Amino acid sequence: MSEDKKPDVSQYNIDGKALEAFLGPLEANIMEAVWTSKKTPTTVREIFEALKKTKSIAYTTVMSTMDRLFEKHLLDRKIEKGRGGLYYVYWPALEKQSFQKSAIREVLSSLIDNFGEVVANCLVDETCLIEEERKALKEQLNKNMTKKK
């Protein structure tokens, strides 16, 4: 993924589980299928075949959702030529763990921008550390927040 293209994780669903906190359910399923695909790059047809084993879904729905994931910079693609004509092949713009870190950083950055030191205090309060570790973590968070400003 090029440096100027940042994944679009502009929405956070507080009730979502795992990837569904950042993506819709179908988007999350498609990303999981792409990440676990034995064949990279992969086609819409291959992802459709994997998904239809567990849910009733239309090929065109998978195709339009993969296009949307490309527009969000979560998938990269290129055109290939085959017996049936031209088609896209897709691959993840980020590995799963990199996506998760990027998405979490976006949310934390937004929280810090909006609520500052309260965020650091809440993070420390939510941890189950002994007092010395809690104090060290709080100092480190405050130091990092000061550097950011």
Image (cartoon, rainbow, N blue to C red):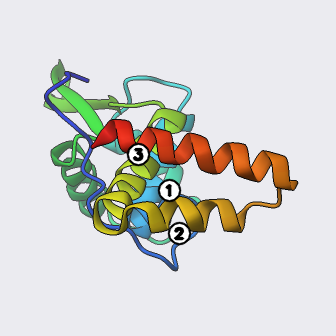
Residue indicated by mark 1: 51
In the picture of the structure, the residue carrying the numbered disc 3 is 145
Q: Amino acid at mark 1?
A: Leu
Image: 66 above or below 144: below
Question: Looking at the picture, does residue 120 appear above or below residue 41?
Answer: below
Q: Residue at x 17, y 21 (%)?
A: 80
**Mark 1 vs 3, N-terminal side:** 1
Crowd around label 2: few <14 · some 14–19 · many ≥20 (10 Å): few
Looking at the picture, how far across and down is residue 49, in whole percent?
Answer: 47, 49
Q: Amino acid at mark 3?
A: Met
**Residue 31 picture location, percent across and down:** 44, 47
For the residues labelled 1 and 2, the Cα–Cα distance comes to: 6 Å
Is residue 25 something one can see in this rendering?
Answer: yes
Residue under label 2, please give it: 55
Element at badge 1? helix
Q: Nearer the viewer, mark 1 or mark 3?
A: 3
What's the residue type where badge 2 is placed?
Lys
SS type, badge 3:
helix
Residue displayed at 44% across by 61% down: 117
Within the image, what quadrant is residue 111 found in? bottom left
Q: Residue at the spot x=79%, y=46% of the render?
A: 133
Quarter-of-image position of residue 5: top left
C-alpha separation, residue under disc 3 versus residue under disc 2? 45 Å
Quadrant of the drawing holding the C terminus: top left
- Front residue of 15/39: it is 15
Res 27 → quadrant: bottom left
